[in-house]
Image (cartoon, rainbow, N blue to C red):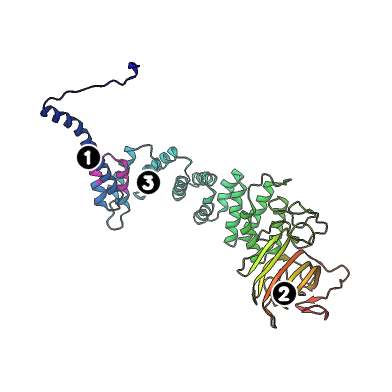
Amino acid sequence: MNLLKPATLEFWLPTRSRRSVFLLAIGLPAFFLILEALRVAAASTLGDSTDEAAVQRALKLDPANPALEHRLGLVLFCSSERPDFASGLGHLRRAAELSPSEALYWADLASACEASHDAACADRSIERALELSPMTPRLCWTAANYYLRTDRRDRALQLFSRLLELDPGYAWPAFQVCLQMLGAPQALAESALCASRNPRLELALVNFLSSRGDNDAAFAAWHRVSAEIGPLSDGAGVPFTYAAAAPYVNHLIEIGKEREALSVWADLERLKVIADGRAGASGRGGADRTDGGGLIFNGGFEAAPLNSGFDWRYSPSPFLSLEFSNAAAHRGSHSLRLEFTAGRNDEVEPVYQFVAVDPQQSYVLSAFVRSDAITSDSGPRLRVQDAFRPSRLNASGPTSVATSSWHQVRLEFSTGPQTGLVRISLWRPRSRSFPSAIQGVFWLDDVSLTSASSPASPAGRLEAGNITNPKAKP
């Protein structure tokens, strides 16, 4: 057991002088370590400054620090008061020499050399930076712009291609630069994006062109994207989500190009980016939808609305509860449920959908509705309007009040010669009589819009907003 005892060394310091020497031998290294820590801390603090004198003092305290050389070079070169390009360039060069594996130092040296009209230094430095850090998006962006400025288009587009593969978030800035320097962002698409066959980046180009009003080029680019993906059986492997295509679809609808928007929408359905909202199968797979909604997309609310494109759109309201409920449905597994909670007399339009139609054509709009204790005489009803000029077409159907079981509401309307897009909505106008405030619950399901070329239905006919059936409810 004695072997396990720790060894003990004893020093005998019989005199005060020996004890002082021993303490000094221990204390001096600690003292110098403290001084060194204070020096480094002071240099670091001064080096964080943008004041030239402060960084100079820091460099005197730590003369072999590449970060301080780099900092002083930037301060001297970029000073707005009294820039010293020659000295700044010297310090940036010294920083790269002290730390030759730091890509940032070489990139900043390249910028300084370019500004100093030293092309050889700039080329050498930017290539050294790329060699050290070839997968850094910021560096690829800097280098691509450098080669674009120096009229070396092929090298620039090669680096832009690498940049967009590393970080697609640079797509719009890259397109903008190519538009300014090359005259058209298609140059980047043709040489870089098409080579990589990256549909997400080409879709970014579609949105960019669309935002600039170059609609023909955007539509052509979209067809290129959809054709490259090809048919898919279940949506697996689609390289982008609907959120990426939504800006383009919404833009086409907003500018009145509903036919192009419908074409894009059909492509998205074909590619399984969105569910087929007009097919016989339920979007959720939980119900048998045998009739479909005609021109209405997702008329049975079986799929969660996209709040975009040709699907249902909705917005929250502080006094109205809106949900796509599975608690009660006319058919299938879901319906739209509205609950008026505050007892107010507000005009509301909680959901609506844009639908492309033909001019000078008659249509039948129908739905199944149900109500529970609706207090006002002005309850929810279907409304159809011209999407751009409601004065051309503005019609509403019968209201739902009190309590009622599921029943069908129908109306017919005719489009004028200039109506190609309508807005189908659920609308509750303000009441003009007592009781005006509304409370209660309302359900909507199986919304359908079809051509009226079939034999006339018993419902009244609505033309340009005028209800011609005197028996229809107000």
Compared to residue 347, the image places residue 156 above or below, namely above
Q: Amino acid at mark 3?
A: Asp
Mark 1 or 3: in front is: 1
Give the magenta range. Answer: 58-73
Indicate the position of residue 123 as horizontal and vertical percent values.
Answer: 40, 42
For the C terminus, the image quarter is bottom right
Do the CB atoms of the residues marked 1 and 3 lie less than 8 Å apart? no
Q: Earlier in the sequence, mark 3 or mark 2?
A: 3
Q: Position of residue 279 (x, y in %)?
A: 78, 55
Q: Is residue 70 magenta?
A: yes
Q: Distance of mark 3 from mark 2, alpha carbons?
A: 68 Å
Q: Position of residue 427 (x, y in %)?
A: 70, 72
Rendered residue at 58%/54% (across/down): 205
Drawn side of residue 65 relative to residue 315, left or right: left
Q: Amino acid at mark 1?
A: Leu
Q: Residues within 10 Å of mark 1 (few under 14, many from 20)?
A: few
Residue 421 seen in the current view:
no
Residue position marked by numbered label 2 in the rendering: 379
Please tell me which of labels 1 and 2 falls first in the chain. 1
Mark nearest the camera among 3 and 2 is: 2
Number of numbered discs present?
3
Assign a secondary structure to mark 1: helix
The label shown at residue 108 is: 3
Q: Which residue is mark 1?
A: 35
Which is nearer the N-term, disc 1 or disc 3?
A: 1
